[in-house]
Amino acid sequence: MIYRENGHFKTSYAADRQIFPIPQDRWAILAILAFAFAGVPLLADEYLFRAILIPFLILSLAALGVNLLVGYCGQITLGAGAFMAIGAYAAYNFMIRIDDMPLLAALLLGGLASAAIGIVFGTPSLRVRGLYLAVATLAAQFFWDWAFLRIKWFTDYSPSGSVSIANLHVFGWKIDSPLDKYLLCLAVLTLFALLAKNLVRGAIGRQWMAIRDMDVAAEVIGIRPMYAKLSAFAVSSFFLGVAGALWGFIHLGSWEPAAFSIDRSLQLLFMVIIGGLGSIMGSFFGAAFIVILPIFLNQFLPWLGGLVGLGISTAAVSHAEFMIFGALIVFFLIVEPHGLARLWSTAKEKLRLWPFPH
Amino acid sequence: MAFFLETLIAGLMVGMLYSLVALGFVLIFKASGVFNFAQGAMVLFAALAMARFSEWIPGWLGIESLFLANLLAFAITALIMFAVAWLIERLVLRHLVNQEGATLLMATLGIAYFMEGVGQTAFGSDIYEINVGMPKDPVLVLQNVFEGGVLVSKEDLIAALIAALLVAALALFFQKTGTGRALRAVADDHQAAQSIGIPLNRIWVIVWCVAGIVAIVAGIIWGSKLGVQFSLVTVALRALPVVILGGLTSVPGAIIGGLIIGVGEKLSEVYLGPLVGGGIEIWFAYMLALVFLLFRPQGLFGEKIIDRV
Amino acid sequence: MAREIGPVILDLKNLSLSFGGVKALTDVSFDVCEHEIRAIIGPNGAGKSSMLNVINGVYRPQEGEIVLRGGHFTNMTPYRAAIAGFARTFQNIALFKGMSVLDNIMTGRNLKMKCSLLQQAFWFGPARREELAHRARVEEIIDFLEIQHIRKTPVGRLPYGLQKRVDLGRALAMEPRILLLDEPMAGMNVEEKQDMSRFILDVNDQFGTTIVLIEHDMGVVMDLSDRVVVLDYGRKIGDGTPDEVRANPEVIKAYLGASH
């Protein structure tokens, strides 16, 4: 009754092309943002920041990047982790090799480096399609895994192979406590989500989707596959690069190449599948789901085991995690190939009609 | 020269194993359009089952003979893999008929995770041994041709022979038998095959069973070489470049691609590796395949695609 | 009709196309004049769709050239064809299934939208102005095709006849000089055919767009077109006004006298 479009007449095309055309949605999103910036800091404790909120924010950003490429442009990638790694290591090298490098600039440069390499590793997409391309993206994954492990220059000849950055600050604001880190990540994510939304609702987003849906027809109406595909690779890699730099600098503090292994790539892919391919909102749902699930299982399974008198080891929990993960992916693909985002929009659709469903 | 030959032969033998795993990919892809990312998990699963049953059976049945225990373990593992094939068809593939390749690929990723979880829960997650009595000592061959001869690992040689036999058997099965023909028909066009009365579901179970057998053999060979452990899943990742090099739909492609990748990997590791710090095997194969793809997008033997609009 | 047929703007010279050993087109030549409606007819497998695919660069002919307003194209690509002013619709509708009707037609404006990626990412300013300006043009096309009520519907959900209309809308959004229509009326009922014929005539009339169309319905072809090319087994067997073609003995033979 309350949630509906009736009575809100659009008088211009501008009003019709807003991100959230329904006023209630606009208020809701503003409320959520206000809560995230002001409410959460008052309520959350350190554990919540470290274990859930910060990983969620950063992985959401990465999932956004993957979704732009896979969900919007239809180019499957199994090498997303490599581009996070490139962002992290590039930003690291900018930080240590240039004096007084501002953190934000390093993040951006990390993203740009990742974007440039993304373009290089995206070129096979011009010749190769679908599954062949998916396998080809693994080349990036394995090459960069190797490079950051074996080429010592990247890790500044650190004997252990792990690198770290200390004394982070943005315009004099010292990023120290979990709260600071949370706020920084939140700000970055908010900005990038807005940029992503602008891209996908604009001309370039339509080009990506056209290539995804029917590439021959796209070319016939004057979309250059090269520009569309490579720009998708570049933007996606840029997002991933920034996310990777945040992951290394902010979340991990000190890290090794294993932090960005193929498991990370697959994890990101699952996020966008479960969240919803081709949906900005879905990237958030997927990231939340995958960040929270293991924590939930870690708490829940031993409790369940205790209930029936079984001691469940951590190893068993991690195996169970594998199983539940796998089963959920298959379940989602069969039951709701469009992911949580589709469930969400179906619910909204229902709500719009409520209480008169016909 | 002898050293080069040694490397070459070692490469060919590893390549044969890659061919075997690649064939598992190709068969499933041809018959169902599924790019089976779970192949690695199947190898791990089969190897774990094999290792643990051959360890448990002597205790259960009081059998002394290693051969008999292994044989029984193989039979049980095969039965389990058949059951897995049936379950995958029942619970997953059947519900995803006519979906896009990407969706199916991701479904097999889900299957892979699931099997890794189940395998380690049921059989444990330590390092186990498979002992099928493979000789571990190397032999010298071609002593009359080269001074000092060429050193070849007997174990690798036997493994390569077994793999070659299996590959040949599969190729024959695919080309010559009625089931093989049905498989090829399904590969060409699901709906057309169905309309002339080929039972799609049964065909899928069959190819997944075949892939299961391939997984057991690969699991045994690699398991006895490296020990049965989680890293076995990467065996499939290493066979992936073979598939794209050879073409997803080509049996000869899988064989020749496997040999090319095997040899390329070994040669690059030996001659190129020291220059850049070693450990390049894993990405070199991918780069090789990638560069190749740029010139021939459909792979060595894959069919050229003409777009119709 | 008010329009006047102008000089030759598209001249196809000695085009031959084969796939492996299969000859799809053999030495086909014909021309298209400005503002005219030119039909390509022929039995199934005569090479009609291949002809369109050659014209806008989806297939590359082994021999022959395409002369467009004096410019010679020996290796046309779909992108170059789009820039040169070709637009087309497809026999088996090639819409972007995951997008709404509005977005599908908006993609047709792609070549005319110049904002950079960065400008689009920040939306406010030039990108927004550009988007809204093109939106206004697209709304005109939506009005013209009478599909206002479905503009937000994903095209995958639309019935066949409407999808064909959206396909035409997307092509029109490119404001083409020459519009290639591949069986625009295939699979339609009489009413839908009438609607589509009206749109085609209106496009030709109002915008002066030159139209090359493939069609099976002889009644429609003979009514709509100014001149007709007849293909059979990849060769041209007839060329001229509908009446001339109807009287051509070779054409009658190809159709077994079955022209209705």
Image (cartoon, coloured by chain):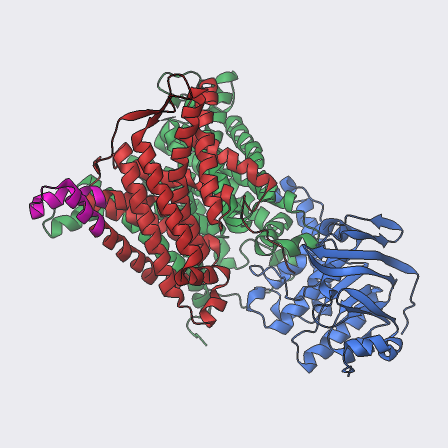
Prevalent SS, magenta region: helix
Give percent across and percent down for residue A44: 32, 40
Q: Closest to the observer: A195 or B39? A: B39
- The image quadrant that residue A39 belongs to is top left
Q: Where is residue C223 in the image (x, y as percent from the top left)?
A: 82, 78
Task: Indicate whether residue B69 is drawn in magenta.
Answer: yes
Q: Nearer the viewer, residue A121 or A205?
A: A121
- Asked if residue B121 lies in the magenta stretch, the reply is no
**Which portion, as a residue range, is magenta?**
B49-75
The answer to whether B230 appears left or right of B247 in the picture is: left
Residue B270 appears left or right of A203: left
At x 55% / y 53%, what residue is drawn?
A19
Chain letter corresponding to the colour red? B
Give how far across and how far down residue B206 sits, in percent.
35, 59
Q: Nearer the viewer, residue C67 or A280?
A: C67
Residue at 49%, 49% in the rendered image: B250
Q: In which quarter of the image is residue A328?
A: bottom left
